[in-house]
């Protein structure tokens, strides 16, 4: 519980309609998209200005009140599950695009701006903001930065961290910190920007983000290759990379996912195929034509049954619609869906695919596998019903084994969904105890009263 | 509290539907209300979590959940966009019924739904009476939409530009025994719908003209009632069930192949909600409801898919044609997947279709939502009005009289010269002008 006087102060800062304390509202800020137990906060505030955010943090610092920032609450690792005695800061009203600078190719935005809204504004100006998480229609830039979100184009264009040029944020005491700049190069001070990306609200609260923009590619070519064995498909992925071709997107769907998508959207996918690769190359028209031909030849050489190139935008849209439908289609099958994102060096994709099939059989659970094969980031998607305790236990065991396998291949527990609460207990496996200790010391120095999103990442 | 436990048990009826929400939050991208308020309790994910909370007996009284549950347009944008296919509208409607039955309806709603709507004869008589006196309370605007604004300051009407009740509702001009015409091909029964009957009878006349032009035989049974959606939205499943009984018994007396309506909301209610929300149907009743649901169709869809229409011959160049933009009613596109057919009708009417941005974004009407949350409803409606104006059209067309009311209100307040017409009105007019 929070003292009444503090609630009064909060109300003064944001105005009465923007302080929520009723139990019903608290319930709606007790969860995110991760499959974890909800926790209700004591209050939620919806600031609109920088000064309001600063005042809220100063008040919390003084009274040792835990703070969890929430963008759209779509993260998959429990990053926005609050502390029972803490408050939630909602960024929904901090959603202005402050500047899109075409000459210098950058944008300055508030953290609550929705990713797709920014991408659309940028596109109108012939520029390109590549990070495109599957949730971009709802996710916020603040959430993307704090999770270092990836997307379908990671392979060629990188992830959110590759586009953050600078940040403005409040530290745990309410001081306003500036880091990075609007210049292409910047060599002053520590690379605090880099530290803040992926920090999940544990080191500071973002107020502004400066993002790099690039020219939009002039041409693109999408293709679908159909395979009779998933080995051939995953070998093709490794083959394309070792042929030094870097497609913008290189996605895989396994048979389980293909059948689910076909049932769901009747897109005309070959349900007897063991796997599909969805590939897109982009760039200068001449390069696109050449790379498309190379990819096509490679797929056939590696045993693709067929490969079709999209002839126009409508066909291209159809290909990507099938990919986008993957999660939806799988989600319809069972009440609970656990979306994992253990990632391996891309040459190990064939091994990882085999391991996932084995794990699914071993624990007798349904795993649909699709994802960003080209960057080693598969999404094994487990379908279950959380109410079935016995089965859910097997699911948890399977997840642990997936982690172990990924690490044994030199991979990571999470390619893009972050640590949050979900993966905090496993982090030591990947990084070792000293790394956890280092992180905890860093955190303790910057946030002595442990008020910034306690419990996330470092487990304390 | 023992009582809340009982409520929790009632909500359990919805458990299997509630657990399908995986809390991904994608509904935030399409919810017109969330776009305005950005509060989680206003979007489907939040409301589903609240219902789960109710089921888990987390609250000491149901009022907070009830209030939040009612802040919803029931537009179904979330359901249409839901990765897990959660049947949000059906869940919310059933939950409203459970809560209303638990709490009891407010006296005002009881009067309206139980005493009036559920008795079609009484309702018609009252509306007829009100239509004759409305001049006392409202003055007509000399505007393109034909709306009125409040003459006396009434808190309920505030500064609305509302559509006046028609002086001659459609049912009045029907022969006492209803209308029966013969034609070739499938035989069609028409469900008129309250708003078309009482506010936009022109749409019904236009529909008749179009069907007779295409030589379609028609039956219009007399004494039709409301489709029941207003009762249902307020959680009054009893009145709803009584209305369904009334209408079903009425239409059963006639022989027809297809039931058409020109009201998107009625079509969607008959097709989707009659079979799923009717209170305790007997197996026989369930069969009848399902059979009728399968026979029910939007009039644009019927005309395009079953009758087939040819574009009107005109010598007009494209540039000379009337520019029309089309608003997709949520109850047509999101609920029933009907989007192309009304557009074909508009083109066939010899108009040039200019698509607006966000044609399938909700107009903000939401039936009683407009009454209880007029400010929010208008804020959503104004976005629609801007998108309509930006097309440079002279007419906006839409297949739902409720959307027509909202859009008329918005355009009226903005002083816009843009007319509001149902596709049937446009098509009927083109038949008048161009048929030899
Ligand atoms: C259907 C679906 C598909 C997805 N696809 C992808 C994908 O392809 N790639 C991918 O990477 N992720 C994906 N995600 C995960 C998720 O969308 C991303 O993690 C996204 O970045 C979260 O954004 P958000 O606005 O919802 O942030 P939230 O979930 O609200 O917050 C995420 C974290 O950011 C912190 N935070 C938010 N705002 C601030 C701020 N102003 N200052 C400091 N910290 C802040 C929060 O405290 C929390 O720790 C997907 C999720 C779903 C449900």
Image (cartoon, coloured by chain):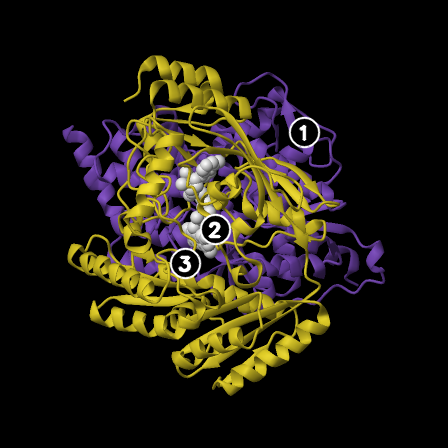
Chain colours: A yellow, B purple
Callout 2 crowding tier (Cα within 10 Å): few <14, some 14–19, many ≥20 = many
Residue at image point 27% right, 47% down: B14
Residue B40 to residue A255: above or below: above
Label 3: state its secondary structure: helix
Q: Closer to us: mark 3 or mark 2?
A: 2
Do we see residue A95 in this rendering? yes
Say the numbered circle drawn on residue B293. Answer: 3
Residue for badge 1: B413
Indicate the position of residue B148 as horizontal and vertical percent values: 65, 28
Callout 1 crowding tier (Cα within 10 Å): few <14, some 14–19, many ≥20 = some
Residue at image point 65% right, 58% down: B343
Q: Residue furthest top?
A: A5
Chain ID of residue with mark 2? A
Residue B255 to residue A309: above or below: above
Near-viewer residue (A300 or B9): A300
Do we see residue B223 in this rendering? no
Residue at image point 17% right, 54% down: A389
Number of marks in the rendered image: 3
């Amino acid at each position: 519980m929070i003292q009444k006087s503090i609630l009064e102060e909060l109300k003064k800062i944001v105005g009465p309609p923007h302080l929520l304390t009723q139990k019903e509202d608290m319930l709606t800020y007790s969860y995110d998209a991760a499959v974890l137990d909800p926790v209700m906060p004591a209050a939620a505030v919806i600031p609109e200005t920088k000064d309001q955010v600063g005042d809220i943090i100063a008040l919390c610092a003084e009274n040792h009140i835990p703070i969890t920032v929430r963008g759209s609450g779509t993260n998959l690792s429990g990053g926005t599950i609050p502390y029972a005695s803490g408050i939630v800061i909602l960024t929904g009203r901090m959603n202005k695009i402050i500047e899109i600078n075409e000459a210098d190719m950058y944008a300055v935005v508030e953290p609550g701006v929705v990713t797709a809204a920014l991408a659309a504004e940028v596109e109108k100006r012939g520029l390109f903001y590549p990070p495109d998480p599957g949730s971009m229609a709802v996710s916020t830039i603040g959430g993307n930065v704090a999770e270092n979100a990836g997307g379908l184009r990671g392979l060629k264009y990188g992830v959110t961290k590759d586009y953050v040029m600078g940040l403005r944020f409040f530290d745990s005491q309410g001081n306003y910190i500036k880091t990075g700049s609007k210049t292409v190069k910047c060599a002053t001070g520590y690379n605090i920007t880099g530290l803040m990306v992926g920090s999940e609200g544990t080191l500071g609260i973002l107020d502004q983000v400066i993002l790099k923009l690039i020219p939009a590619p002039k041409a693109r070519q999408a293709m679908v290759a159909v395979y009779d064995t998933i080995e051939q498909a995953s070998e093709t992925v490794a083959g394309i990379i070792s042929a030094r071709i870097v497609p913008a997107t290189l996605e895989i769907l396994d048979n389980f996912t293909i059948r689910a998508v076909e049932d769901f959207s009747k897109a005309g996918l070959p349900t007897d195929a063991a796997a599909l690769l969805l590939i897109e190359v982009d760039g200068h028209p001449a390069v696109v034509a050449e790379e498309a031909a190379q990819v096509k030849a490679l797929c056939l050489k590696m045993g693709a049954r067929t490969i079709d190139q999209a002839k126009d935008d409508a066909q291209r849209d159809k290909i990507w619609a099938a990919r986008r439908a993957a999660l939806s289609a799988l989600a319809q099958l069972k009440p609970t869906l656990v979306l994992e994102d253990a990632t391996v060096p891309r040459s190990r994709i064939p091994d990882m695919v085999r391991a996932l099939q084995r794990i699914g059989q071993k624990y007798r659970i349904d795993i649909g596998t699709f994802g960003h094969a080209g960057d080693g980031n598969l999404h094994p998607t487990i379908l279950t019903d959380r109410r079935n305790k016995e089965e859910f236990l097997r699911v948890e065991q399977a997840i642990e084994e997936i982690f172990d396998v990924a690490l044994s291949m030199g991979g990571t527990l999470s390619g893009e969904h972050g640590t949050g609460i979900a993966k905090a207990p496993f982090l030591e496996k990947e990084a070792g105890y000293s790394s956890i200790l280092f992180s905890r010391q860093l955190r303790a120095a910057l946030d002595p009263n442990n008020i910034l999103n306690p419990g996330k990442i470092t487990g304390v | 509290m023992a009582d809340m436990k009982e409520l929790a048990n009632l909500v359990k009826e919805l458990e299997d539907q509630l657990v399908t929400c995986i809390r991904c939050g994608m509904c935030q991208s399409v919810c017109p209300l969330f776009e305005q308020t950005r509060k989680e309790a206003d979007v489907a994910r939040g409301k589903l979590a609240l219902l789960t909370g109710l089921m888990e007996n987390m609250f000491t009284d149901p009022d907070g959940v009830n209030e939040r549950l009612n802040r919803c347009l029931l537009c179904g944008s979330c359901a249409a966009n839901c990765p897990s296919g959660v049947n949000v509208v059906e869940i919310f409607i059933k939950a409203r019924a459970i809560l209303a039955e638990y709490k009891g309806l407010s006296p005002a709603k009881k009067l309206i739904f139980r005493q009036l709507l559920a008795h079609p004869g009484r309702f018609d008589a009252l509306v007829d009476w009100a239509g004759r006196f409305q001049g006392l309370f409202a003055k007509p605007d000399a505007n393109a939409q034909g709306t009125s604004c409040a003459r006396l300051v009434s808190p309920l009407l505030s500064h609305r530009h509302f559509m006046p009740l028609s002086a001659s509702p459609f049912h009045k001009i029907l022969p006492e025994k209803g209308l029966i015409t013969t034609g070739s091909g499938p035989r069609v029964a028409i469900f008129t719908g309250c708003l078309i009957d009482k506010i936009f009878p022109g749409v019904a006349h236009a529909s008749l003209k179009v069907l007779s032009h295409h030589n379609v035989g028609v039956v219009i049974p007399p004494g039709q009632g409301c489709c029941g959606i207003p009762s249902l939205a307020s959680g009054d499943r009893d009145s709803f069930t009584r209305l369904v009984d009334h209408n079903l018994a009425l239409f059963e007396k006639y022989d027809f192949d297809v039931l058409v309506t020109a009201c998107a909301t009625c079509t969607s209610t008959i097709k989707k909600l009659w079979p799923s929300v009717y209170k305790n149907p007997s197996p026989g009743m369930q069969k009848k409801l399902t059979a009728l649901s399968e026979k029910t169709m939007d009039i644009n869809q019927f005309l395009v898919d079953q009758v087939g229409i040819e574009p009107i011959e005109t010598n007009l160049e494209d540039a000379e044609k009337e520019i029309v933009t089309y608003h997709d009613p949520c109850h047509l596109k999101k609920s029933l997947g009907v989007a192309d057919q009304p557009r074909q009708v508009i083109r066939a009417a010899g108009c040039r279709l200019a698509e607006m941005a966000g044609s399938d974004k909700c107009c903000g009407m939401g039936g009683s939502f407009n009454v209880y949350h007029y400010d929010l409803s208008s804020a959503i409606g104004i976005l629609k009005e801007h998108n309509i104006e930006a097309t440079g059209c002279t007419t906006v067309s839409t297949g739902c009289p409720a959307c027509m009311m909202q859009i008329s209100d918005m355009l009226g307040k903005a002083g816009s010269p843009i007319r509001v017409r149902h596709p049937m009105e446009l098509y009927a007019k083109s038949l008048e002008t161009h048929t030899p």
